[in-house]
Image (cartoon, grey):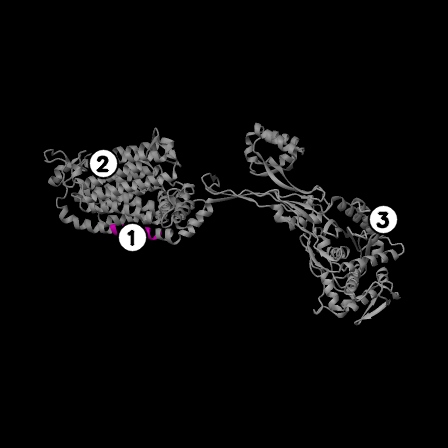
Amino acid sequence: MFAALRRIQSADAAVTLAIAALITAGLVALAGISAPVSEGFESQIVRQGVFVAIGLALFLFMSSTNYRMLSVFAWGVYGFAMLALLLVLFFGVERFGAQRWFLFGPVQFQPSELGKVALIIVLARYYTAVYEFRHAAWAFVGAMVLTAVPVALVLLEPDLGTSLVFLVIWYCMAFVAGSRFLHLGIIAGLALALTPVAWFVMRPYMRERIVTFFDPTIDPLGAGYNVLQAQIAVGSGGLWGRGIAASQSQLEFLRVRDTDFIFAVIAEQFGFIGSVVVIALFFIILLYSLVVVIRAPNDFSRFLATGILAMIGFEILIAIGMNIGLAPVTGITLPLMSAGGSSLVMTLVALGMLLSVSLHRDVALFHASSRGDLPIGRRAGHRL
Amino acid sequence: MATTSPKNPGSKATGAPRFGRRLLILGAIGAAMAAATGERLANWQVLEAGDLAATAGVQQRNEQIIASRRGAILSRDGTAMALSMQVDRLIGSPNVITEYDTADVARYLAKVLDVPYEQIMAKIGDPSVAYVVVAEDLDPDQSAQIRQSMRRGEIGGFRLEPVARRVYPGNFLGAHLIGFVDGAGKGHYGVESFYDQELTGRPGLVISDQDPRGRTIPVGNYDPLPPVNGATLILTMDRTIQRIAEQELEGALARFGSSSGSILVVDPRSGDILGMANRPTFNPTRLDTYSEIGENFINPAVSLIYDPGSTFKIMTMAAGLDAGVIGPGSRHNLPGVYEYWGLEFKNWDERTYPNQDMVSVLANSSNTGAIFVADQLGADAYYDYIRAFGFGETSGIDLAGEVRGILKARGSLSWYPSDLAANSFGQSISTTPIQMAMAFSAVANGGLLLRPRTVGRIATAAGNVVNPAITEIRRVLRPTTSRTLIDMMYQAEHSIPGNRALRLRYSTVGKTGTAEISAAGGGLLPEQTIASYIGFGPRENPQVLISVKIDKPRTGTWGSRVASPIFRQMVDRVFEYLRVPAVA
C-alpha cells in the first residue's frame, strides 16, 4: 500500500489537493446554511464531516489498491449494485415522492450512487473483453443492455437525473471504446426522435422543469421559483461574495440549497471570484482525468477512467448548469460539494480509482503470469 | 467470474490516435460548456449583480409598521371631543373550526355577543371560509369572555384583532370644527385634518430579515424605531358655549324656516374660537350613515363664501374714521337713490335722510351713506383698509379647507368704479363668516387683526406642552378709531327703537346685515337674503364676539328681525356663563 506513495507525481498531488479544497469549500458552504455543530449528528455539517472521513479513507484505499483488482470484481460489484437497486424499490424509504434510499439507522444510503461506479467498472471490463468485436452490433447492444438494467431500475424510483448519468457514462465509454459512429449515431438520432415522445411520457413535474428552464418567470412562485431564487442568489454574490452568512441562502429562499442548489449558495457566499476558483478546481480534476485516460496503460484502465471522467464531468456540468439556468433542474448533486453521504463517498471512490490508474500504471497485479486463470493478467501480459 | 476474451495487443499502436481524436471531441464539448458557464457567471455576478442583489434585499426585508396612537382632542374645559381607543373585533376562520361543533360555537357566540344565532351561523357556517369578521367593536366584557373561552380551548378558529377606533363622545357637537378620521386613520376636515401630523405622531418601524414565508428572523440586525404617539390637542372651543351656539342655531333655523346657518363665538382679544356652530352638520361617529363625502362635511364658517351686506359698513366706517376723511359728526344727506358711476344705489327703504351724522348712517343702515364714506376715502385708500382687515386672503385659521373669498382688486379687469359703491355696503364682495368675525374683532380689540385659532394648547406624548402664542397679523386701526367707532355703534344701536339685539343687562354693540344672494349665473336671487348680526361686548372692554348668520330665512328676511334676537339670546347665555359683569 505504501509503495503507491512513492509513485505519486505532481499531477496526482495536485488533483488530491483540488479534491481536498473542493470538499473543504463544500463544508464551509454547508456550515453557512445548516444547523450549528452543537446539535451533534443532527447537524448536517457533522454528518457531512463523517462522510468526508469515510470517503477520504476509501479514496486512500482505492488509490493505493491496484485498479486491476477491479476487473476481477467487476461482475460481482455490478450484480450487487443491481440487486440493491432492485431492493430499494421495495424496502427503501420514500422521500419527496421518490424511493431512492435505504435507511440504516441515522445513515441513508443511495444505491444508485453505487450503481454508477459499478456500471463504469463492468463496462470497462466488458469493452476490454469485446474490444476485437467493438464494431459488431451485438457488442454495442450488449453494453446497452448492461446499462439499461440500472437505468430502468433508477427510473422506477423515479430519478430521471441519475438515469441520465448512467446513459451518459455508457455513451461516452462506448464512444471512447471505439464503437462505430453508425451505432452511436443511431442512438443519438433515436434520442432526438424520442424527445417529443418523452414529453408525453414525462411526469408533470418534469415538464414544468423543462418549461421553466426556458422561461422561469412563467411560474415565479411555483416551478420557476428555485431557478429564479438561484439567479438572485448567484447574482447577489457579486464579485467578491457576501460571506458565509449570505442571506439569500441562509434565509431559505433557496430550497434544496444543500444539494441541488449548493453551487448557488457557494456563488452567493464567495462571489464571482469564488465561483471561478471552484470551477477551476473542478477543471483540474477533469483535466487530470483526461490525462489519465490518454496515458492509460491498457484498455481496461482507459475505459475505466473514461467512465469516471464522463460521470463526474456530466454531473459537474449539470449541477452547475442548473444553478445558473444553463440546464434544466434535474436533481443531480454537485460532486464533492453537495450534502449527501452516498454521492460524496462514491465520488471519492471513483476518484480513488482514477488515482490508482495513475499510480499503478506500470504495476502488474501479479509479477508473473503464473496465475494463468486470472483473465486479464494472462491477456495483457507484462503491460498489466 | 470467468469472462475471457483476448484483447487486441496492438491497441497502443492503432488505437491511440483514434482515442486521441475522440477525446479531443469530448474535450472540445467540455471546453465549450465551461465557456458558457463562465459567461453566465460573469453576466449574473458582475454585470447584473446590483439588480439581483437589490431583488434579494427587497424580498428579504420585512418592514413592520407599528401604528402610533392618535392623540385626543379635548375641549377648552378638558372634556374629550375625540378619542382613539382600541376595540377588538372577532375574526373567525371556519375552515379550522372543524374540531368543534360549529352549531355549539355559534350558539355560544350568539349568547356572548347578544346577536341572533342565525346571524352568527351565516358567517361561520361555511367550512371553506378562511377569514370572516364575525363581530365588530366588541365591548371589553365581551372581549374578555371570548378571550377566556379561547384560552380554555372551548372555542377554536377565532381570534381577536385589535382595531383603532376614533370616538367622538359629543357626536354632532362641534363636528365641523373637529372633523373626522377615516378608516385608514387619516384625518379629514377641521382640526383632525389640519393637525393630522401632530395627532398621528410618528409610526414605529421594525425592520427585520424574513424568510420566504414572511417569518422574521431574529438575527436580523436592524434597530427598531419605536412609535411616538400623537399629541393631545386642547381646543379653544368651550363645550358649553358650543352647546349654547348649536342650540340657538337649531332653534333659529326652526323658527325662521331656514336650513343653514352659522354662529361663531370668538374672543376678540386672542382670536380664540370659543364656539363654532354650523348647520347642516354631520355626526363623525356615524360616518357610515353618509353615502358619500358631501356638502355636510364642508365647514360653512371657513369654506363657504357669502356677500356680507350691511355688517360690512362697519369696515367702511372704520376706514373713513381711521383715515380722518370723516368724523362721528360729519354730516351728509343720505339720498334714497344715488347714482354712482352709472349705477343706481338705493337705501333699503329708498328714503332720503337729509343732513345726517355718521351715527345715523349706521343706525339707518344707509347704503348711500356708506357710499359717501368710501367715496370720500377714494378707491386706493379704501381698498388698502379692506385688505388690511384681511379680506381677499385667508384668515389663517387652523382648520382645513379655508377659502379666501373674493375681493375684486382695483385695477383688475373685473373691477368697475361702481364696485367701490357696492363694496362699501357689503355687496359684490365675498367673504367667509370667519373673515367677518376677525374684522369685527379688530374693531373690538383696539385695531389689531388677529389670526383666529381653534387649538390653544398642544400636549405632546412626551409630556411637552406647547402654548401657541396669539398671532397678530397687523394693526388695521388706531386704538382711538376703535374707541370712537365702538361708541358710534353703541349710539346707533341704542337709537334704533325696539332693537332686538340689545339686552339691558349687557352693553353690546353690533351691526345687522341683510345680504342679497348672488345667483350662480350672475345677478341676485330675488326675495332671498342672508340675515346676519355681528356684535360684541361688553362695550368698555369687549371680551366676546358673536356672529350670527341665517341663510335664506323663509319668515322674515331682515337681519334685524332674524339674526338680532338670536344674537341677544346668545349674549344672554354666553355672557352669563362667562360671568361677564352685567351693567349695574
10 Å crowding of disc 1: few (<14), some (14-19), many (20+): few
Q: Magenta segment: does it hold B30?
A: yes
Instruction: Name the amino acid type tagged 2.
Output: Leu
Q: Quadrant of residue A285?
A: top left
Question: Residue A247's spot in the image, x, y percent?
Answer: 42, 43
Q: Quadrant of residue B459?
A: top right
Which secondary structure type mostly characterizes the magenta part of the structure?
A: helix
Give SS at disc 2: helix
Q: Quadrant of residue B511?
A: bottom right
Give SS at disc 1: helix
Q: CA distance from mark 1 to mark 2?
A: 33 Å
Could you confirm whether marks 1 and 2 are on the same chain?
no
Q: CA distance from mark 1 to mark 3?
A: 109 Å
Instruction: Name the amino acid type tagged 1.
Output: Ala
Give SS at disc 3: loop
Q: Is residue B18 above or below residue B485?
A: above
Front residue (pair B358, B299): B358
Residue B411 located left or right of residue A235: right
Question: Residue A229's spot in the image, x, y percent?
Answer: 42, 46
Q: Which residue is mark 1?
A: B32
10 Å crowding of disc 2: few (<14), some (14-19), many (20+): some
Question: Residue B375's spot in the image, x, y percent?
Answer: 79, 68
Instruction: Name the amino acid type tagged 3.
Output: Val
The label shown at residue A60 is: 2
Q: Residue at the front extreme? A: B480
Question: Residue B392's spot in the image, x, y percent?
Answer: 70, 61
Quarter of the image with the C terminus of chain A in it: top left
Which residue occupies 76% across, 44% down? B240
Where does the magenta region start and end? B27-40
Q: Which residue is mark 3?
A: B583
Residue B574 located left or right of residue B181: right
